[in-house]
Image (tube, grey):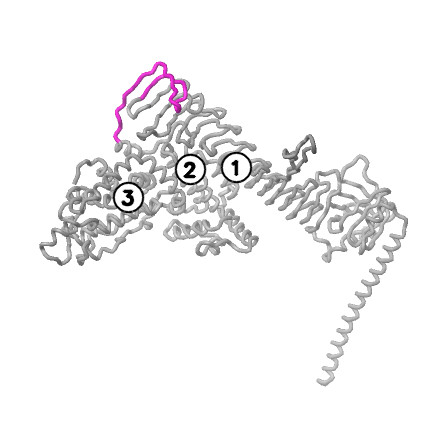
Amino acid sequence: MGARACCGYLRNINLRQELQAIIARLQKELNAANQAINDAKRTARYWARPLDENTLPLLRVAGRKLVLQMDVGKEITKINTILPKALLPQKYQHVLIFNDAMILLSKKDYRMLPLELLWLHNDTTSGPPSTGLLAPEMQLHVEFRDDVHRNKFTAACEQWSAKKPAPQKRRCRYEFIGSSTDLAGSSYDGVWWGGKPHGRGLLRTADGTTFEGHFQEGKFHGFGQLTVPHFTEEKDSSFSSFFLGSPVTKTEKLTESKGVFRKGKLCGLARIRYPHGDLYEGYCINGEPHGFGMHTWDRGQYLGGWKDGKRHGYGVHTTRKTRYLGEWQDDKLHGQGCRITIDGTYHEGTWQEDMITSGRLVGPANQNNFSVEYEGNFEDYGILSGKGTLRLAPNATIHGTFSGNVLNDEVQIVDGRVTMNENMDLIERFLEEESLRESTHIPSTSERWSQMFEIFVEDELGGNFTETAIVWQKIVSGIRKGKEMSGQMRDTGPCALPVLEQIPSYDAPWTPGYRVMLHEYFNAAMNYEPHPLWRLCHGTVDLFTCSYNNMATHAALYSQATLELKSLIEENYKIIRLLFPSLPKDPYEVMPESMTKRSASVDSGTSPEGSPARTGPDPAPPIEVPTPACEFLYAFLFPRVSPIIFTIYSLSSAELDAIYWNRALYLNAHTDVKLLEYFQVPRELWPIELPSVGDLDKPLIRACARRKFYESAILALQQLSTDANPTTKLAILADTFEEITQCVFKFADAGCNHTWSADDLLPVLSYVVVRSQIKHLGSEIRLLDHFTKEYRHRRSIDLMFTMLKSAYVQIHIDKWTP
């Protein structure tokens, strides 16, 4: 066969195939048209039959076509009603399947079911051909005369779906009409499975209640929002009832519950806004606050434990005039706790049924900065009743039996005995208060919020850390799902998106690289609100703030606020260590490779008066500042809680700091030479390099200089109050000593050959401290001591801190004048 003949042959084959496709398409359209005509004729014949005049208008809808008609007793032998259960089940006579619904007809009633909400299951057991039928509010068992009619029934019911068999998961809108359930008159628009809402959808009930969220087997299950209306009727008092009658105003208020539901009830983290505006945010069980949460109303707030909808366990209760930090039982103050009022009165002790029965009271400070203190039995707030001790003066204590209101100076004393105590010096009290003590009248700070952290681990992280990889997969999966739902991730930090979407190398060894990886991940998590660590750490800040802000920023809370903050840091570290198990068990452990080496922070290339500095080898190696394993928590928490905790420290050290500040102001009025002489700084440590001037002018310049000697060290120490992180404060202290050494090396006679001793260092540092003019230096020293003691101990920086404290005490107690 030639090439031309082959081409013609192939061309004919292609034309034949195209014609066959056209014919097949036309035949399909013709069959569809014939089917539509037959359906229309069948529907017309059916509507021509005499029907109930009430039923016909409801069933006859434009566009509705009859697809299949079967009669009970002929094609269908029997229909058994499984649900709803009734003493006299409905007896159906006809089954009509239209193009949009199936209708079950009885003598005087009918039931219409959308085809999309019919789930069929053919019975394969021995016996007559039958099919199980599931639909909203209904479950039937249908028996057929033979398999042919059963197949016709199945095909007609599944005509709505292009996929055969029809998918089990479907989306449709349905209105509930049965009176056998609580959903009568309700409508549901969403995902279905097996005749029940199963998936995401919106339910509206007859009384106006709505739920939008996830369902499982017909019940709220998963995340969603439930809105319940409440209607109240109020008479308008502006109208006269005698003449017109008072019109009634109907007001609608809502209860909005948003959170995690299980089997129709709130169970998990939730937010509830009540009709009167109250707001609850926290954990719930069976729709009631349970576990840990915060309740806010127009005049106050409660943050703490809950049980069956009532305050129970440790909590913080705040009103406009009072704050209570302590234990609750059945919605009442019961157990140990403390109470602060807006006038500064402080109670701590044992409470029963909202009343204090025994403990300690500290009254508001008087003009002499002294507070009345009482320890013993109480009848009510400020009302003494029974044995106790009353301190009315710094060195006078009364023992006896008391009654009356001590706050109003109405106290009666029986069998009183006065004891004169030696008045403790302020410096002795300052050194004594460096060791923190927990009061016996208040709950232990290490146990206060243990329930909150246990709930967080169980609810947010799954509570099972035998397989850390599973927990990480859950966290990453939640982040990716949240990203898909929101469209984009809130990314306020550098590279937060790629860092959080990947599981970090949490099981790698504890190395400097691991530490860098941890810090990067933690910083990224702090910029993404849905992350569990974001909620943990920001929630800790909120918890501490709610406990100690405003009126609770009280000097009497100095010890417990400090111990509580340390406990919160350690609890946060424990939870983060569950995710990063290579972290050291001790949060204050210092990795040798993480020691920060400090170098001079201020340019010391010129002398105080501008002359060139000496050159030569460094006199000493750079100072190393220890960095604890929990440094990432310090860096996050302290800038946020510092305004509160430092204010409490300032109030506690106010008297001592005031004396120090007055003394520092007086000393600062003198020249550098007088101060150096006053502090007995050795002459070889004076930075005395001067510019090229006449010999007669040198004594005058040297005598008149102010804030010129050790200037770089002064500038370094002044940064102490500008940073909240205690580790950074230690680094600033190291910078200060480095600058002192550099000044001596470059500008003093001692030069680089000088070896520091305590006798040399303390006078120089005292001069630098005075010139730095840090107003609340005592508070800074206390805070630095309490939060760095564990990891600075027995290191070179600890000696420098001791020198700073000694300089503060020396300035305070020294009464000599320059």
Residue 81 seen in the current view = yes
Most common secondary structure along the magenta stretch: strand
781 magenta-colored = no
Residue 208 vertical position relative to residue 45 in the rendered view, above or below:
above
Segment tinted magenta in the rendering:
397-425
What SS does tag 2 mark?
helix
- Image position, residue 223 (x, y; %): 59, 45
Q: How many marks can you see?
A: 3
The amino acid pointed to by label 2 is Asn
Q: Residues within 10 Å of mark 2 (few under 14, many from 20)?
A: few
Q: Which mark is residue 54?
A: none
Where on the picture, by quarter, is residue 649? Answer: top left
Residue wearing tag 1: 298
Query: Residue 413 location in percent, x, y?
Result: 36, 16
* SS category of the residue bearing label 1: loop
Going 51% across and 46% down the picture, which residue do you hit? 471
Cα distance between the residues tagged 3 and 1: 41 Å
Q: Residue furthest left?
A: 696
Residue bearing the label numbered 2: 550
The residue carrying mark 3 is 774
> Toward the viewer: 706 or 303?
706
Q: Give the residue furthest to the top.
A: 415
